[in-house]
Image (cartoon, rainbow, N blue to C red):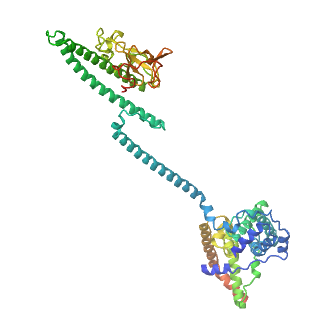
Amino acid sequence: MEPDANQLVETACRGDRAAAIELIELFYERIYAFLRRLAANDADAADLTQRTFGRVWQALPTFAGRSSVSSWMHSIAYHVYVDWRRADRRAEPRSDQWWATRPAPEASPAEIVAHTDMAAALYGSVDALEPDLRHTVQLHYYQALTLQETADAMGVATSTVKYRLRQALAELQRKLAAEPNSLTSTATSRII
Amino acid sequence: MNIPQIENLLRLAPRPAPPAGLKDQLIAQLRLPAARPASQTPVATLAPASWLRRWWPVLAPATVSLACAAALTVQQMEIRDLKQASQALSRDFAAKASALLTPTVQTNDAASEADAASRTQQEIARLQELASQLAAEVAQLEQMSAENTKLRTQLAAPPAGLFTPEETEALAKAKERGERIACVNNLKQLGLAARIWAENNGDVYPPDILAMTNEMGTPKILVCPGDHGREAAKDWASYTSANCSYDYLAPSASITETSRMMFHCPIHGNWGLCDGSVQGIAKDHPELLLRRDGKIYLVEPTQPAQGAPAPPSGNPPPGGSNP
């Protein structure tokens, strides 16, 4: 996929509009999902996605291939989000827990309820993490970027990404362990 | 819940779906920059070279350092080779020094100043060797002169009837011939001393005789043996013009004027030339001398003056007594 993305960027640099449209089709869903989690708002996420691709087209000739196209675009999206939040002096957005309406597919009703409660608790804990830890978790786990791609997107070292992930997972485990009864009781009550 | 379970759950997190129409909006807002020329480096080829870009700040100084080290090594090797060549040349020069001191004229092509300097040193060494040889000859002649003096005293009052008149005349001729040869030897030593002085003073002969006392060694060579009314100075401190039998004709002359007369013995008519040779020219052959601008030159033997008689057989022919 990445070689194709590189080829598309190269072709788009020569002014090929079709290649640019292919790039949009390839990445706009992931970029929107990333920004949706960051901005916690559909309208803002759509606006930020448009800004991100606007910057992508401007920065297209400067893409040197030092990182993958995916991490390059995530990096632009991340900076667009940071600039947007700084410009409007917005506070760190709180999660609207949209995932509560998204049960895991192909599961029994009980498993769906249990999984939904567990996932809700986990995703809520992720949203309560420090911004750096939360963004790292989102890029690595939600956006399925590799450690190197996550580091490139955030502009930090790979070792920093590893450290943040370890710290985030430990904190998530600690939070989930602190309220197991509530999770279990919630799931049980829903099953009953 | 353990860490792997948390990680699995995080990886299975649902993805927010973009709103309808977002893709169309993005396509509608698509504004590509000006087309990049195809000659520029393509993106695909830059990716493999990313390590070079990343390590360039380290590789560049390392490459420069290696290049400098290589250049220094090559220079050191060249310097060592030149030193070895110089030592070999100096050894060869020392080995061939005796051969180079022979009176053969150096006909090398004077390619460089170093060669010219080395030839000058060789010439000086050769002339000094000749000076030592002539000094030895002078010592031998002095010994012979002492023996002659002894014989002369014996002959001053020969016993009556010891020599016939013919024998007496033959003895007088032999004596006069010996004095002439000693005079020629003196002039050759003077010419050699002047040449040594000129080699050390810009190829110009000394302005007067006293300037080259270091090169002459003794003031005795300034007195012609046939000049019985003149005595040699004991040392240079007591030397005056009365202690010199010869005329110095080429003060501050250039050594390139080889045919110019430098010394003259008015008693025997011997002439010392600027090339170091000595010519015996009788007084009745003035056509062999060319006077011009107060200077006296020897006419070349191949261009004798018209109607001039041949030089007397008793004198050495011109050019016949080169050093």
| Relative depth, front residue between A100 and A72 | A72
- Give percent across and percent down for residue B13: 70, 79
- Give percent across and percent down for residue A136: 66, 70
**Residue B255 left/right relative to B130:** right
Seen in the picture, residue A57 relative to B20 is either above or below; the reply is: above
Seen in the picture, residue A96 relative to B37 is either above or below; the reply is: below
| Relative depth, front residue between A157 and A88 | A157
The N terminus of chain A: image quadrant: bottom right
Is there any visible trace of residue B202 in the rendered image?
no
**Residue B67 left/right relative to B136:** right
**Residue B202 left/right relative to B176:** right
- Give percent across and percent down for residue B103: 36, 32
Is there any visible trace of residue B275 in the rendered image?
yes
- Give percent across and percent down for residue B272: 39, 20
Residue at (31% x, 16% y) in the render: B219
The C terminus of chain A: image quadrant: bottom right
Residue at (82% x, 76% y) in the render: B19
| Relative depth, front residue between B93 and A116 | B93
Q: Quadrant of residue B276?
A: top left
| Relative depth, front residue between A124 and B29 | B29
Residue at (25% x, 17% y) in the render: B174
Seen in the picture, residue B199 relative to B95 is either above or below; the reply is: above
Q: How many labels does the image show?
A: 0
Seen in the picture, residue B305 relative to B56 is either above or below; the reply is: above
Q: In which quarter of the image is residue B240?
A: top left
Q: Quadrant of residue B176?
A: top left
